[in-house]
Image (cartoon, rainbow, N blue to C red):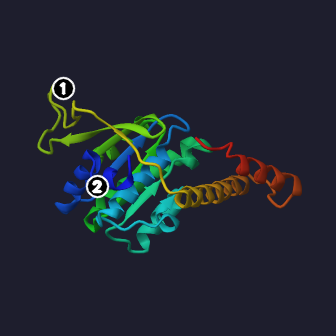
């Protein structure tokens, strides 16, 4: 599937419909390790950029940490797309997901008026807290590399949830499967560089927090080795 054809796919058309109504959109992408979640997010970003729906710059709008996610909002970004990747979770899952979910809930609930599109990449949908799931508009699950299925999330804002048969948030029964286009090599290479640099920073922060001297030659060689091989990727 070519990029222009994908830009007019059912998934992209639905995102555009939500965005043109003036809504911010939260997209959840989940799937197992190396299933193509990050590349899927970049395909969506490039397709929406092609349709002039939002701006996206991989150098500015791809984040791997809670701190960078918060700083991105402090910079006053509007009508952009931000991707929050999952890299940090594998290193300190308990602390990361607590901070992540708190930050997301506070920011999403107060900053949605800015018209940004959020893509959250997680290994499992359940990693997102219940309070944050109510913001999700679209769920995408990876099947294989380059192939995913997606469905809309319907919300009944007036339903208080007393009756277990009538939930406030449901997934639509209709599932659409789409083939993703191949990304340009320059985008893929840019992603790999950002991923490598950000994951190395994460390792250095962990070393600092637990009192390891990161200046020792042996430890720095270890950091460089696993960062280059991508052994900490989810």
Q: Residue at x 57, y 61 (%)?
A: 190
In the displayed structure, 73 sits above or below 48; it is below
- Where on the picture, by quarter, is residue 80? bottom left
Above or below residue 95? Residue 184 is: below
Q: Which residue in the rendered view is the most extreme toward the right? A: 217
Q: Position of residue 165 (x, y in %)?
A: 16, 25
The span from disc 2 to disc 1 (Cα, nearest Å) is: 27 Å
Please tell me whether residue 195 is drawn above or below residue 133 in the rendered image: below
Q: Residue furthest top?
A: 165
Q: Residue at x 28, y 48 (%)?
A: 9
Which residue corresponds to mark 1? Answer: 164
Q: Quadrant of the C terminus?
A: top right
User: As rendered, which of 77 and 159 lies closer to the eye?
Assistant: 77
Residue 103 location in percent, x, y?
43, 56
Q: Residue at x 46, y 36 (%)?
A: 31
Question: Residue 8: x and y, percent?
Answer: 27, 52
Q: Is residue 96 visible?
A: yes
Query: In front: 145, or 196?
Result: 145
How crowded is the residue under tag 1: few (<14 C-alpha within 10 Å), some, or many (20+)? few
74 displayed left or right of 53: right
Taking the view exactly as shown, the residue that stands out farthest to the left is: 158
Q: Looking at this view, is 199 or 132 the one in front?
A: 199
Label disc, if present, on residue 25 of the rendered structure: 2
Q: From the viewer's perspective, is the residue at label 2 or at label 1 nearer?
A: 2
Q: Secondary structure at mark 2?
A: strand
Relative to residue 42, is residue 91 depicted above or below? above
| In-image side of 20 versus 29 (left or right) | left
* Residue 102 visible to the viewer: no
């Amino acid at each position: 599937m070519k990029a222009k054809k994908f830009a007019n796919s059912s998934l992209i058309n639905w995102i555009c419909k939500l965005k043109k109504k003036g809504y911010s959109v939260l997209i959840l992408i989940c799937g197992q390790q190396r299933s193509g979640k990050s590349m899927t997010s970049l395909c969506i970003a490039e397709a929406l950029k092609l349709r002039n729906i939002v701006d996206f710059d991989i150098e500015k709008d791809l984040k791997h940490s809670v701190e960078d996610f918060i700083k991105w909002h402090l910079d006053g970004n509007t009508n952009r797309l931000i991707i929050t990747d999952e890299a940090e979770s594998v290193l300190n899952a308990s602390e990361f997901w607590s901070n992540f979910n708190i930050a997301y809930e506070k920011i999403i609930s107060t900053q949605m008026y800015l018209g940004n599109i959020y893509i959250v990449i997680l290994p499992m949908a359940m990693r997102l807290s219940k309070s944050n799931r109510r913001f999700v508009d679209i769920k995408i699950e990876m099947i294989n590399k380059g192939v995913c299925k997606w469905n809309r999330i319907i919300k009944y804002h007036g339903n208080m949830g007393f009756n277990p048969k009538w939930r406030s948030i449901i997934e639509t029964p209709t599932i659409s499967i789409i083939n993703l286009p191949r990304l340009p090599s320059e985008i893929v290479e840019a992603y790999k560089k950002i991923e490598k640099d950000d994951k190395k920073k994460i390792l250095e922060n962990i070393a600092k927090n637990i009192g390891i001297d990161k200046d020792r030659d042996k430890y720095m060689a270890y950091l460089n080795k696993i960062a280059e091989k991508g052994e900490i990727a989810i």
